Image (cartoon, rainbow, N blue to C red):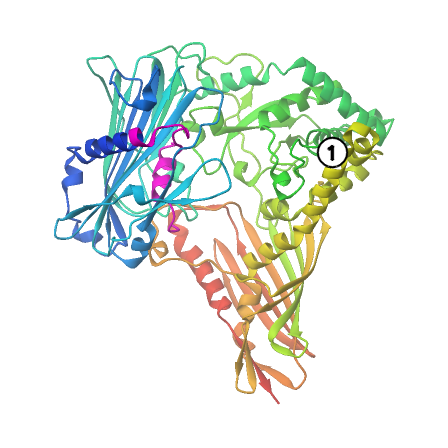
């Protein structure tokens, strides 16, 4: 884990957003409240926070989480009397406390600073405030305790209205125990629905004790579920009729939560939805209702309700706009075969929703690529357009590959939705982003159960289509193909000149399309493909009142074009693990916007140093790093006891043609020829001198997106073979 915010990590594990009080909050009252909270939390009587001894079996761990406790309170009868609660009828509080033993320099760096937001005005429709309080103290091996002065937190100006703050734990040393917490308190005049919470009983470090305590008042409804062998929560009530939920686990081993991991499928977890009871509740829960293990059919019913009533006015406008595009493309479009017409309708609709519009902010840069249209909203208006042309489809839903399994979903947000279009060869339509085309299934949704959302209301526990899985791509479908021509940069024998041609297929292109594609180019490509005569600029310039807008839009397009060099530089840096000395040229050869030309293809030319070292009159060329940037595993990651979840099966196929400088020969070529092949993948490397060029080929394949833990040694062998090749050098010998 990077040495950033452990506090924000804990909040994300709890599903809590760390936000703060409005700017008008009185700082004196805030400090008084902070002092009271610290006194309250430090006085907790839990035995775990009094323990100072780490078991011998954890002596070699980088650090040990000796205790973690989360307390959730929602509108109980408890009274909290301070400035921000004035005239508020409802409150929601959360406290997460953690005590960790620091055993080495790596964990010392990780925990040496804590960051949080303070005094941020809440966004949203509700009149409410949320305030964050932080406490931290250092417990020395001799038992002395030093409180960290949280008033010394440093403000980081991020150019926005909120204030990001960082708290340095300057006196923390190896052998110390850090005891810290975050409390958030939210008050509202009206009932609000807090974050839906997920508590994962696991971490990159071992946890000796993890305990959750919830007190929920009768104005709220509750849904909860234990997952993946987590114990059932103990449910009780107090004298005020608040619902009490308690759950805890001990002696949790370290788990590689950030490395090829699906925590919500592999680690014990507890899920809690605190819902505003009554008619406001999405599931129609009554105030005070408590539901354990929400049936999947209930959630699908809720989805069915949401997709059954698209806005008629919006639907009519979109139908008209799409038909206008279809007619412009081919006035006889209705005579096309159904599969061709379905694809054409998808592209016309995508153009209308994503491309043919000017944002109020005139955003046409890299951020425009991540423009987000809710998947439900996108598809519920696409379906009637298809039906208008006698192309029928049905909605199916599926969980996310790295999220809760279909058996453990707790709400609409756990499921994505696609249209399964009824053609001679059925095809899925979905909306991942503005580059999604017909039949493309995002990596996050592959290989998942996809039950049907039916138009008729489900009866309880009746779900159709659970045995149907979304298609799973292969390593051949998802390739990164690199062809590099490498030579010394003129007479500079310390600098390499690289001409690179890259082809990304399938899932390999998802991230790079978002980073590298220029909206203006994509817009023009789709406008020409659909035979749309007038551009956005034409329409803006036509209206006099839009003169300033058109000029600003043109300036925004120019700025976006200028940013491409930096975006390609970042891409090159990521591949070569160092910044290029100079980026000479860059070009998108194919954007990969259509199923008929699906690959993202681009060319770059740049110089890079650091791959050549002088050795007397000779040179050492680090040829392995030219073609391969392997994973770097920490010592703890080399041992694994949990199944492996990768994003997708994939292949890296790289060929390098290196121009041998005149007067030099190459030595050490034979050691570059190796082959490893097992059930999980393969690494094949070869090299030979052909005339005045050294030709090197590197191909690595991960055959599957998931592997059982017993296959970890085979995956480790592939990683090690790639790492070994990355360290390979050849000698360029003079004479």
Q: Is residue 300 visible?
A: yes
Q: Where does residue 491 sit, x and y in percent of width and height?
A: 66, 79
What residue would you read off at disc 1? 549
Which residue range is magenta in the image?
1-29
Q: Residue at x 53, y 62 (%)?
A: 578
Q: Residue at x 65, y 50 (%)?
A: 563
Q: Where does residue 81 sit, x and y in percent of width and height?
A: 26, 21
Q: Main secondary structure of the magenta part?
A: loop
Q: Residue furthest right?
A: 331
The quarter of the displayed image where residue 666 is located: bottom right
Q: Residue at x 60, y 37 (%)?
A: 441
Q: Nearer the viewer, residue 413 or 406?
A: 413
Q: Kindly state the secondary structure of the residue where label 1 is placed.
A: helix
Position of 488 with respect to 329 (left or right) is left
Position of 213 with respect to 512 (left or right) is left
Q: Nearer the viewer, residue 124 or 67?
A: 124
Decide: is 306 above or below 43: above
């Amino acid at each position: 884990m990077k040495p950033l915010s452990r506090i924000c990590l804990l909040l994300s594990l709890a599903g809590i957003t760390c936000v703060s009080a409005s700017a008008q909050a009185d700082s004196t009252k805030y400090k008084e409240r902070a002092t009271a909270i610290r006194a309250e939390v430090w006085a907790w009587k839990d035995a775990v926070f009094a323990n100072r001894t780490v078991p011998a079996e954890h002596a070699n761990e980088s650090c040990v989480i000796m205790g973690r406790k989360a307390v959730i309170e929602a509108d109980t009868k408890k009274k909290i009397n301070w400035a921000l609660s004035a005239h508020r009828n409802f409150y929601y509080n959360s406290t997460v406390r953690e005590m960790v033993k620091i055993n080495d320099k790596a964990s010392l760096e990780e925990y040496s600073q804590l960051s949080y937001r303070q005094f941020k005005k809440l966004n949203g429709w509700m009149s409410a405030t949320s305030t964050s309080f932080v406490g931290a103290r250092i417990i020395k091996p001799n038992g002395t305790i030093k409180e960290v002065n949280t008033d010394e937190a440093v403000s980081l100006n991020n150019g926005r209205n909120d204030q990001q703050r960082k708290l340095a734990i300057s006196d923390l040393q190896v052998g110390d125990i850090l005891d810290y917490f975050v409390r958030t308190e939210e008050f509202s005049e009206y009932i609000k629905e807090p974050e839906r919470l997920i508590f994962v009983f696991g971490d990159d470090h071992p946890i000796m004790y993890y305990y959750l305590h919830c007190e929920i008042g009768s104005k709220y409804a509750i849904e909860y579920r234990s997952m993946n062998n987590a114990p059932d929560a103990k449910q009780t009530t107090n004298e005020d009729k608040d619902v009490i939920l308690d759950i805890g686990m001990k002696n949790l081993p370290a788990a590689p939560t950030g490395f090829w991991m699906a925590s919500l499928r592999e680690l014990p977890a507890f899920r809690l939805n605190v819902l505003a009871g009554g008619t406001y509740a999405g599931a129609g829960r009554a105030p005070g209702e408590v539901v354990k293990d929400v049936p999947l059919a209930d959630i699908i019913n809720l989805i069915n309700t949401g997709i059954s009533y698209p806005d008629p006015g919006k639907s009519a406008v979109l139908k008209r706009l799409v038909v206008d595009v279809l007619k412009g493309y081919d006035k006889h479009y209705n005579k096309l075969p159904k599969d061709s017409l379905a694809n054409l309708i998808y592209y016309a609709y995508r153009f209308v929703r994503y491309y043919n519009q000017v944002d109020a902010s005139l955003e046409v840069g890299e951020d425009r690529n991540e423009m987000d249209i809710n998947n439900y909203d996108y598809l519920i208006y696409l379906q009637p357009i298809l039906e208008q042309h006698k192309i029928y489809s049905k909605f199916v839903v599926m969980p996310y590959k790295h999220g809760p399994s279909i058996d453990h979903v707790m709400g609409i947000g756990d499921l994505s939705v696609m249209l399964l279009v009824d053609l001679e060869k059925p095809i899925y339509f979905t909306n991942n982003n503005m580059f999604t085309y017909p039949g493309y299934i995002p990596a996050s949704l592959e290989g998942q159960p996809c039950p049907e959302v039916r138009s008729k209301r489900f009866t309880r526990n009746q779900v159709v289509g659970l045995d149907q899985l979304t298609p799973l791509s292969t390593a051949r479908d998802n390739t990164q193909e690199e062809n590099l021509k490498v030579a010394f940069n003129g007479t500079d024998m310390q600098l390499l000149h690289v001409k690179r041609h890259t082809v990304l297929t399938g899932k390999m292109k998802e991230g790079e399309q978002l980073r590298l594609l220029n909206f203006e180019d994509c817009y023009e490509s789709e406008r020409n493909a659909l035979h749309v005569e007038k551009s956005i600029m034409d329409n803006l310039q036509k209206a006099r009142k839009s003169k300033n807008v058109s000029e600003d839009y043109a300036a925004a397009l120019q700025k976006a074009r200028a940013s491409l060099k930096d975006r390609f530089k970042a891409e090159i840096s990521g591949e070569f693990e160092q910044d290029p000395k100079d980026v000479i040229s860059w070009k998108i050869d194919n954007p990969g916007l259509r199923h008929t030309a699906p690959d993202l293809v681009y060319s770059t030319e740049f110089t890079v140093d650091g791959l050549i070292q002088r050795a007397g009159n000779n040179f050492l060329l680090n040829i392995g790093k030219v073609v391969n940037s392997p994973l770097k595993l920490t010592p703890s990651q080399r041992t694994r006891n949990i199944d492996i979840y990768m994003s997708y099966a994939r292949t890296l196929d790289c060929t390098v043609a290196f121009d041998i400088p005149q007067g030099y020969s190459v030595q050490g070529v034979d050691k570059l020829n190796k082959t490893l092949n097992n059930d999980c993948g393969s690494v094949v490397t070869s090299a030979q001198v052909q005339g005045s060029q050294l030709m090197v080929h590197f191909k690595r394949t991960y055959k599957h997106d998931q592997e059982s833990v017993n296959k970890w040694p085979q995956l480790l062998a592939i990683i090690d073979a790639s790492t070994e090749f990355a360290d390979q050098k050849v000698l360029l010998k003079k004479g």
